[in-house]
Image (cartoon, rainbow, N blue to C red):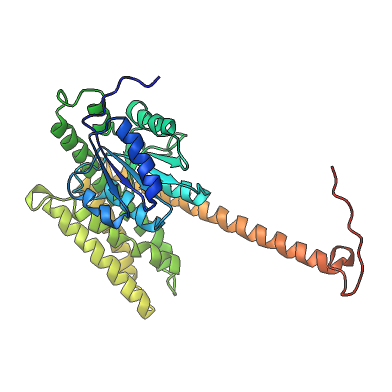
């Protein structure tokens, strides 16, 4: 039996190009007495949800333009000015491939719902969002439910009890809750974490790239990594207030971005100045210190170095596994060539197929 929740104040949006499926969802929510249910036949037509009137629940289809769908999810969770970036968000699909499952988790959705659906399945997922929603984590490039099953390595990322307007309204707590205060506090937490994790990510990219940039011919991997610095700097900059006590952070951040771009330009010319490479690391560390002055720079640098070391080890393991698989495939091919009994019979030869085993 469904708990006694009142959905008469809850708003929802359904983004689905399949008319029949959208109507099924709308009918289920209608029978649950949702106050307002908006239908959108594409992600593009629903983009207004990111700027005004974000509802308490969104169902978004991932079988149409899948890239657009996940850009929408990521924008909703990560853009600073979304009215309710913590809204309940369920992705729907007919084809739950492993790749899709990974994208759902990495984009920040709360859940995945497989079609065709029954009214009970829809209701159960909504109740789950009310009663058992996971806390949110914030990293440099992710905001959303914490999907880790094991403890995180290194510095623990704090978990946010994100405002859940679906729960507040359905459980009758909306009038009592200071929703604006809750939102302001949560958004402040996200902003602070984005700055901190972004500055650490910039330092990570700079440190990872240093050996490759220092070679006579800069490594492509190193250039790719410093090429990512600009995006994290841009995100950090838009999370800074105009002027005030954080103006120095803006200055350092812009200097880091310019230097990263300068290094890429030097690499295109075939030579990279060693002093500029060292300066990039120094300035990236200064950015970390400026963003989080209360934390020891030594501790932050140690965290970055450990992350780079772990990342290099994972890349090496992947390379070794790939090489081993290639060697196995080559050996199998060579064995088939050397052993006629396992090779394909010559043209015109008659063969007798054996019966499959039990």
| Residue 224 vertical position relative to residue 173 in the rendered view, above or below | below
Question: Where, by quadrant of the figure, is residue 13 drawn?
Answer: top left
Say if residue 234 shows up in the picture.
yes
Q: Nearer the viewer, residue 75 or 88?
A: 88
Q: Nearer the viewer, residue 43 or 32?
A: 32
How many numbered marks have been drawn onto this rendered protein structure? Answer: 0
Residue 350: horizontal and vertical position, in percent? 92, 68
| Left or right of 185 on screen, residue 313 | right
Q: Nearer the viewer, residue 33 or 320?
A: 33
The single residue placed furthest to the left in the displayed view is 244
The single residue placed furthest to the bottom in the displayed view is 269
| Left or right of 97 on screen, residue 60 | left
Quadrant (top left/top right/bottom left/bottom right) for the C terminus = top right
What residue do we see at 13% from left, 54% from top?
A: 248
Residue 144: horizontal and vertical position, in percent? 33, 41
Say if residue 109 shows up in the picture.
no
Residue 78: horizontal and vertical position, in percent? 27, 48
What residue do we see at 32% from left, 70% from top?
A: 263
Quadrant (top left/top right/bottom left/bottom right) for the N terminus = top left
| Residue 3 vertical position relative to residue 202 in the rendered view, above or below | above
What residue do we see at 40% from left, 34% from top?
A: 122
Residue 333: horizontal and vertical position, in percent? 76, 66
């Amino acid at each position: 039996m469904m708990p006694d929740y009142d959905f008469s104040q809850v708003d929802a949006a359904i983004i689905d190009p399949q008319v029949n499926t959208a109507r099924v969802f709308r009918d289920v929510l209608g029978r649950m007495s949702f106050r307002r249910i908006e239908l959108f036949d594409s992600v593009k037509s629903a983009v207004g949800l990111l700027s005004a009137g974000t509802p308490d629940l969104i169902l978004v289809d991932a079988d149409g333009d899948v890239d657009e769908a996940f850009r929408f999810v990521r924008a909703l969770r990560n853009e600073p000015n979304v009215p309710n970036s913590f809204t309940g968000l369920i992705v729907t699909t007919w084809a739950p491939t492993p790749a899709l499952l990974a994208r759902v988790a990495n984009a920040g959705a709360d859940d995945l719902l497989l079609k065709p659906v029954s009214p009970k399945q829809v209701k159960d997922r909504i109740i789950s969002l009310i009663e058992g929603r996971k806390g949110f984590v914030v990293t440099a490039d992710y905001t959303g439910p914490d999907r880790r099953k094991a403890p995180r390595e290194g510095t623990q990322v704090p978990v946010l009890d994100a405002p859940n307007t679906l729960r507040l309204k359905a459980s009758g707590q909306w009038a009592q809750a200071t929703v604006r205060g809750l939102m302001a506090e949560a958004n402040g937490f996200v902003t602070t974490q984005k700055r901190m994790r972004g500055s650490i990510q910039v330092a990570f990219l700079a440190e990872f790239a240093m050996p490759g940039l220092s070679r006579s011919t800069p490594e492509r991997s190193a250039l790719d990594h410093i090429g990512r610095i600009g995006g994290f700097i841009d995100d950090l900059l838009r999370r800074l207030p105009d002027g005030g006590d954080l103006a120095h952070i803006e200055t350092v951040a812009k200097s880091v971005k310019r230097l990263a771009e300068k290094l890429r330009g030097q690499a295109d010319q075939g030579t990279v100045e060693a002093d500029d490479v060292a300066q990039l690391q120094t300035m990236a560390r200064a950015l970390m210190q400026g963003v989080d002055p209360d934390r020891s720079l030594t501790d932050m640098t140690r965290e970055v170095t450990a992350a780079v070391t772990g990342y290099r080890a994972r890349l090496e393991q992947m390379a070794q596994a790939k090489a081993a698989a290639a060697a196995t495939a080559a050996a199998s091919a060579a064995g088939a060539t050397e052993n006629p009994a396992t090779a394909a019979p010559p043209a015109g030869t008659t063969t007798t197929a054996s019966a499959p085993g039990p």
